[in-house]
Image (tube, rainbow, N blue to C red):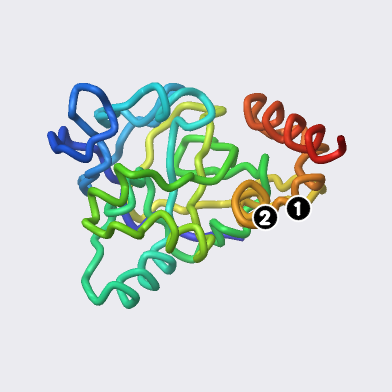
Amino acid sequence: MTGRLAAVNLGVVTEAEWAGDPSGRSGIDKRPVDGPVLVRFDGVAGDFIGERAHHGGPDQAVYAYAAEDAGWWATELGRPLRPGAFGENLTTYAVDVTGAVIGERWAVGSALLEVTKPRTPCTTFAGFWGVPDLIKRFTVRAAPGAYLRVLREGETGAGDLVEVVERPAHGVTIGEMFRATTLEPELLPRLADVPELPEPIRAKVLRRLGAAGR
């Protein structure tokens, strides 16, 4: 499967009451940039991350959201949503982000990325949009976008191809993982044997399965 990048977006410093960081600053407001951007192991060069306790790190170095899913939300809310409105670094086009398999590898520009986990909606996201019930609505919609780790640093920019170069055989997708950890816990056993699952999530899944088996 091959798609393209509609935009590469970098966070600007936003100070607001809804910002999740104790400093009152957030990097959720990301804006499209021109030209190639360096994607590093620790994230996209020039991106601002406010609450590093819950954002950033190797398993969340890059966040991707599909332009098609953003279009659904624009219709749902009755207002335009520009690239970066979801706090995503990469706005994709013709890429099945919800259907991406955990551990799937994307060649994007000269960088190599690996799909790690879905995004979990938070109060910062709801505050940024000014939609109080957004967490519930986003969860029900179950098109959360995907976090990616960086396997090879490189440059990428709007218009670059997004090519899936490897896909694990287990078949567990971003959408399935999101539903399993939110509204459909009966899917949790599917996650236990996914070798590419980030370790903190694996531990949480095993705890929940252990508690359910008592």
Amino acid at circle 1 = Leu
Numbered marks: total: 2
**Which residue sits furthest left?**
15
Q: Residue at x 22, y 69 (%)?
A: 80
Amino acid at circle 2 = Glu
Instruction: Tell me residue 150's x, y (percent).
Output: 51, 30
Q: Residue 203 appears in which quarter of the rendering? A: top right
- Mark 1 surroundings: few (<14), some (14-19) or many (≥20) residues within 10 A: some
Residue 173 shown left or right of residue 9 in the figure: right
Report the disc number at residue 187: 1
User: Looking at this view, is 85 or 139 the one in front?
Assistant: 139
Q: Residue 205 appears in which quarter of the rendering? A: top right
Q: Residue at x 27, y 31 (%)?
A: 47
What SS does tag 1 mark? Answer: helix
Q: Residue at x 63, y 55 (%)?
A: 179
Q: Nearer the viewer, mark 2 or mark 1?
A: 1
Q: Does label 2 or label 1 sit earlier along the sequence?
A: 2
Instruction: Tell me residue 37's x, y (percent).
Output: 30, 36
Q: Which residue is mark 2?
A: 176
Instruction: Tell me residue 2's x, y (percent).
Output: 56, 59
C-beta proximity under 8 Å, tags 2 and 1:
yes
